[in-house]
Image (spheres, rainbow, N blue to C red):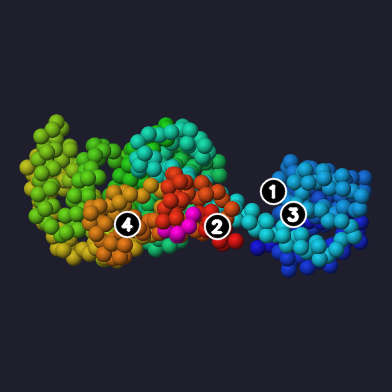
């Protein structure tokens, strides 16, 4: 990595000597230019990338200190090295107050200059790593905040936390979820897909649009739009869909007005994603367009979905029939039962379709639109129950051929942990993510990896922590947050249990 340097001296011979007789490339610098005056130097800085300024303290009718003073206010990230003559120590003290990295006496000893600039390059390299880590730390905290709020990990919304992270809490908000195909003929390789999607968003979206992006699931990406009309969002998404080279489905929530409502908006965008199966000519679905079909939010709860997926995974057709009949009997006892039953049947078919897409190689999906039409043609609870029974029996062959407990599932779980280790990951959250019962997921993970879920998550977090301790100067408090621990004390305790030393001891040993 090279750092960009400019040299400022009013004496042409000295300037040429510093520029030409030092092998700047060999010590990690690229010479961006030279200047005779402060004005020339500032012009270079405004138009060229500059990391370091080497300036004489005595310029014609000017002082290098004036340049250093301006840079300390206007470009505080630029490091300065000053050349001073004997007897100019008062200037040197002033330079130190401005944060100058070092000062060298004239005539310059090239060996001393090389040592100074080698040390400075090492400092700049460390600063660059720290800035990168702090940026990554902030992005991790923001993603963690959005995911915990969207998935209701925490029961209350704290606006102060959002504002501390620089996240706007109110406005006309819309949540968009992007989902990549991970089964069937349109399967997308996830490696690099999210990076390409993010790059396409930055290129295609209106520069004036205010939006937040976060990584919300293994095969998804989420974008929160602020104060964008539905028309503007649809236009941007349509352009993105045309420009993005990989097949992706897009679900859009209704407008909401506070981040406190992010969880229901996340649900709405997810349901819109499910209903992308209904649209043959478009992969963009707005929840507002299909909310009447859904009727109610929790027709199939997370708990019921897990129960059904357990039956799917065990290939237990009898259990599927029993569960669905039980639920339809329950729904039929309430008011407006026929609409509840319509929604239940549609939701069940979407759930079954998702399961088979995930675990049956070559499965291309059913015609959900036609299935929905068949459902609404039934005008009684009895007719719907009979239709539902016939539907489940029609899936028996496909269900028997499905292979849900394969190494790909465990690898997907491991990838999810690798991406989301900084978040509040629980066995239940993973079960919800992968449509498996927690007990079955735990058993499967242990069988395939030889360790339990908690041990694997802890290993991933500790490996990330060791890298941060070794390669950055971040505080232990910051590192604990970056790897998913709210309490630095608990993080240090776990770290010592795993490595045999405290985080500080580990860092000291790496020096």
Per the model, the C-alpha gap separating discs 3 and 1 is: 9 Å
Mark 4 in CB contact with mark 3 (< 8 angstroms): no
Counting from the top left corner in percent of width and height, residue 152 is at 34, 40
The residue located at (19%, 49%) in the rendering is: 307
- Camera-near label (2 vs 3) is 2
- For the residues carrying marks 4 and 3, which lies nearer the camera in this image? 4
In the rendered image, residue 140, in percent from the top left (x then y), is placed at 48, 48
Q: Residues within 10 Å of mark 2 (few under 14, many from 20)?
A: some
User: How many neighbours does mark 1 have within 10 angstroms: few (below 14), some (14-19), or many (20 or more)?
Assistant: some
Comparing marks 2 and 1, which lies closer to the viewer? 2
Task: Check if residue 501 falls in the magenta segment.
Answer: yes
Earlier residue among tags 4 and 3: 3
The picture places residue 342, in percent across and down from the top left corner, at: 17, 41
Measure how far apart labels 2 and 3 are at the Cα level: 29 Å
Residue 417: name its quadrant. bottom left
Sequence-wise, the earlier of marks 3 and 1 is 3
Q: Is residue 42 visible?
A: yes
Q: CA distance from mark 4 to mark 1?
A: 43 Å
Q: Which residue is mark 2?
A: 507
Q: Secondary structure of the magenta portion, mostly? A: loop
> Disc 3 vs disc 1: Cβ atoms closer than 8 Å?
no
Which structural element holds mark 3?
A: strand
């Amino acid at each position: 990595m090279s750092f960009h340097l400019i040299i400022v001296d009013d004496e042409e011979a000295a300037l040429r000597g510093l520029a030409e007789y030092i092998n700047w490339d060999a010590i990690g610098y690229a010479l961006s230019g030279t200047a005779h005056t402060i004005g020339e130097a500032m012009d270079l800085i405004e138009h060229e990338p500059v990391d370091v300024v080497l300036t004489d303290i005595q310029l014609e009718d000017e002082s290098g200190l004036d340049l250093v003073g301006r840079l300390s206010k206007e470009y505080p990230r630029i490091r300065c090295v000053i050349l001073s003559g004997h007897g100019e120590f008062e200037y040197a003290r002033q330079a130190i107050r401005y944060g100058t990295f070092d000062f060298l006496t004239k005539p310059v000893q090239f060996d001393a200059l090389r040592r100074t600039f080698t040390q400075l390059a090492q400092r700049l390299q460390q600063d660059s790593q720290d800035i990168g880590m702090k940026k990554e730390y902030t992005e991790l905290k923001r993603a963690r905040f959005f995911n915990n709020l969207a998935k209701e990990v925490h029961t209350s919304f704290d606006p102060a936390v959002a504002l501390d992270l620089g996240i706007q809490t109110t406005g006309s908000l819309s949540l968009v979820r992007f989902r990549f195909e991970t089964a069937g003929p349109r399967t997308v390789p996830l490696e690099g897909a999210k990076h390409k999607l993010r790059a396409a968003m930055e290129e295609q979206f209106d520069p004036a649009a205010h939006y937040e992006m976060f990584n919300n699931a293994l095969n998804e990406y989420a974008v929160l739009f602020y104060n964008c009309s539905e028309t503007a969002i649809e236009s941007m998404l349509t352009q993105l869909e045309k420009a993005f080279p990989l097949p992706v489905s897009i679900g859009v929530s209704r407008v909401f007005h506070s981040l406190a409502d992010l969880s229901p908006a996340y649900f709405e965008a997810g349901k819109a994603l499910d209903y992308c199966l209904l649209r043959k000519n478009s992969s963009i679905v707005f929840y507002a367009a299909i909310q009447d079909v859904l009727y109610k939010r929790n027709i199939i709860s997370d708990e019921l979905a897990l129960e059904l997926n357990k039956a799917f995974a065990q290939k237990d057709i009898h259990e599927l029939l029993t569960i669905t009949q039980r639920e339809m009997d329950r729904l039929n006892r309430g008011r407006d039962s026929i609409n509840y039953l319509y929604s239940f049947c549609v939701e069940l078919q979407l759930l079954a379709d998702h399961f088979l897409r995930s675990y049956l190689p070559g499965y291309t999906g059913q015609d959900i639109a036609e299935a929905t039409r068949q459902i609404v043609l039934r005008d009684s609870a009895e007719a719907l129950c009979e239709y539902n029974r016939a539907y489940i029996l029609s899936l028996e062959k496909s269900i028997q051929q499905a292979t849900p407990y394969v190494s790909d599932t465990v690898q997907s779980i491991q990838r999810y942990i690798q991406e989301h280790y900084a978040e509040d990951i629980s066995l239940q959250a993973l079960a919800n993510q992968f449509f498996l019962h927690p007990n079955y997921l735990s058993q499967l993970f242990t069988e395939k990896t030889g360790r339990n879920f908690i041990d694997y998550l802890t290993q991933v977090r500790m490996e990330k922590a060791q890298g941060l301790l070794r390669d950055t100067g971040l505080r232990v408090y910051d590192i604990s947050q970056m790897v998913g621990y709210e309490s630095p004390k608990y993080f240090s305790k776990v770290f010592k249990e795993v490595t045999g030393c405290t985080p500080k001891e580990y860092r000291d040993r790496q020096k």
